Structures are given as C-alpha cells and as structure tokens.
Image (cartoon, grey):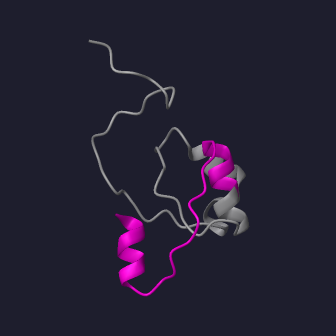
Amino acid sequence: MIEAGLTQLGYEDGEMLTGTYPVINLAVGQGDADYSAVYWKPLQDQFFAQAGGDDKSLLAGPLYTGAIAAADPHTRRIR
C-alpha cells in the first residue's frame, strides 16, 4: 500500500529489500534503503538508536495501532 502511494506521488518503483530488524534499521540509517514500514515500538528502539537514531532517520508513524508482535516472524497460529 505504501509503495503504491509513493508511485502515485511520482516516485520510482524500487526493489523491495528484506532482512532482520537490526539490518533494516541499519540500511535505512545508512541510506541503503529509503524507508521501512516495519517498526515495533518499543521492541526495536535499541536497533533504531544503534543505527543512528533521530540523526539518521525519521519515525513518522504509527501506521497502525493495537497490533501484537510475535517473537518469531514464522510463528503459526495455534488452534
């Protein structure tokens, strides 16, 4: 959804990058990625700070509220 909105605003469609949360924060902080729509506050605050914090990136969210983060991105729902 975010990429579609940026394309409508005139930005070029770029390659989607994937990685662990520390790597994602570092990539944005170093300019290797333009944005990330993944940020769990306060769980990723340390990664954000170590990647340069507010001096390197802007936290512009939240994109959603009331969500629950899973400890493992491959966690399955238990019935």
Relative to 48, say whether 66 is above or below. above
Please provide percent x and percent y for residue 50.
Answer: 71, 50
Taking the magenta stretch, the answer to whether it contains residue 30 is no
Q: Residue extending furthest top?
A: 79
Toward the viewer: 64 or 53? 64
> Is residue 78 rendered to the left or right of residue 6?
left
Toward the viewer: 25 or 19? 19
Relative to 51, say whether 1 is above or below. below
The stretch of residues the image draws in magenta is: 1-26
Please provide percent x and percent y for residue 68.
Answer: 35, 33
Taking the magenta stretch, the answer to whether it contains residue 19 is yes
Toward the viewer: 36 or 57? 36
Identify the residue at horizontal 56%, vertical 43% (top origin).
Answer: 44
- The quadrant in which the C terminus is found is top left
Identify the residue at horizontal 45%, vertical 23% (top origin).
Answer: 75
Toward the viewer: 54 or 62? 62
> Is residue 57 rendered to the left or right of residue 77?
right
Please provide percent x and percent y for residue 47.
Answer: 64, 46
